[in-house]
Image (cartoon, rainbow, N blue to C red):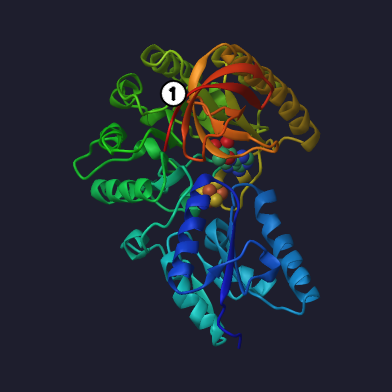
Amino acid sequence: MKTPPKTYHVKSFGCQMNVYDGERMGELMAAEGLSATDDAAAADLVVLNTCHIREKATEKVYSDIGRLRKNAAAEGRSPMIAVAGCVAQAEGAEIVRRAGVDVVVGPQAYHNLPALVAKAAVGEAALDTDMPAESKFGALPARRRVAPSAFLTVQEGCDKFCTYCVVPYTRGAEVSRPFAAIVDEAKALVDAGAREITLLGQNVNGWRDGEGRGLELLIAALDRIEGLRRIRYTTSHPNDMTDGLIAAHADIETLMPFLHLPVQAGSDRVLKAMNRSHTRDSYLRLIERIRTARPDIALSGDFIVGFPGESDAEFDETLRLVDAVGYAQAFSFKYSPRPGTPAADMAGQVPPDVMDDRLQRLQAALNRDQAAFNAASVGRQCAVLIERRGKLAGQMLGKSPWLQSVHLMTDAAIGDIVEVALVQAGPNSLAGVERLRQAA
Ligand code: 5AD
Ligand code: SF4
């Protein structure tokens, strides 16, 4: 038996969709009358919203639970612990056995969190990893006050089955939320303070409405919402970059010139073994078409080094692809075998020291290109959406259209859009000087 919690703390790991889900779980608990606390060790209920994408991310959950218990015990407390997210989905009751947590709830079932917490409070088993046909979204409370840059999940799940990836198993099959529900939520976000919305989906450009129309239709509708100044979307699969969506980058001014388009590897043999269903050439041709539509677009990507069987020569093809594209930023990872995925059983698992070496070389190339992209921005003038205060008095931080962090001295408020001259570049951010301001 535990006393019903009065305060809660949600900690999200992993992707932006988890950040979105974490916010929505917070809204659910607030609607139940609980209040939020920033200090996990002081909360009556701690929700760990977990990521299963790589082994490291998964192991982190167990060490976090241990640390949390220890810190709380030092203060004579024993908080209720709920494990949500993709580890909850993948490991289910195993988490209860291994870590004795109170609640386990999967990413498609978290609208039931209040009921599960009530069950746990009376000592009942509280586990829900169902993937119900009826979507959770209808059962979630209204959006509260949000930051100027907000996330909005429009699509979930994945049918692509890349051979390394757990997402089809943890998030389920591809499902698009209905057009009207998304437009309503976007309007609510703008009313709650959002000026920029990033549309989220594991395969966001696979979004389709009931009649099979694609993401550009949704973006065009959001473009008409008064007060919404910027639209972004992530993550996209190369095979779902349609002509219509590419054209939207040329035609829709609020659609920001930034695209996260993971390629994962540069060798056709590796891409095939990954079941990526695109080739190095088809990807490069696609990039060309996107750049023709929107010449200043900033490109981002994801890479995996050391996929089973990857040879030195094949890895070199990844480096050459990076040279050919010139990414503005990118994420790169060592391959991590995930239980239940086809690649985990493939021959030719790459030794850790080889992976380390490849990751270092790849990251050196990506950092070089990011620094070059930032350096090339110096001298440009652009709009910056102010998101938070900087370290120095009078300094504010925001984002350029190309998703670069920009710091500047200004008395503009959070949520304002400031016209800025970019005057200096560092590896991870730019310095700007204010020109003009539009109030939020
Ligand atoms: N090992 C390493 N990286 C992975 N990713 C997905 N699965 C794995 C894995 N098993 C990376 C991919 C993906 C990003 C979200 O995480 O690059 O695009
Ligand atoms: Fe991690 Fe993928 Fe789940 Fe996001 S969807 S939390 S990246 S496993």
What crowding class fits label 1: few (fewer than 14 Cα within 10 Å), some (14-19), or many (20 or more)? many
User: Badge 1 is on which residue?
Assistant: 257
- Side of 36 where 358 appears, left or right: right
Mark yes or no: residue 343 visible.
no
Residue 417, percent across and down? 46, 31
Q: Position of residue 343 (x, y in %)?
A: 59, 42
**In the image, what residue occupies the spot 44% across and 45% down?**
151
Spot the residue most to the left.
211
Q: Is 389 on the left-hand or right-hand side of 225?
A: right
251 and 174: which is toward the camera: 251
Which type of secondary structure does the marked residue at label 1 adopt?
loop
- The residue type indicated by label 1 comes to Pro
**Where 195 sits versus 377, above or below?**
below
Q: Is residue 397 above or below residue 83?
A: above
- Inspect this view and state whether residue 37 appears: yes
Q: Which of 167 and 244 is in front in this view?
A: 244
User: Image quadrant for the N terminus?
Assistant: bottom right
Place residue 319 in its image quadrant: top right
Image quadrant holding the C terminus, namely: top left
Image quarter of residue 202: top left
Q: Where is residue 211 in the image (x, y as percent from the top left)?
A: 18, 41
Query: Which corner quadrant of the figure contains ligand 1?
Result: top right
x 57%, y 27%: residue: 404
Question: Please, is residue 300 above or below residue 55 in the view?
Answer: above
Percent coordinates x, y for residue 305 in the rendering: 66, 31
Q: Residue at x 62, y 16 (%)?
A: 423
Camera-side residue: 440 or 219? 440
- Which residue: 62% across, 45% down? 344
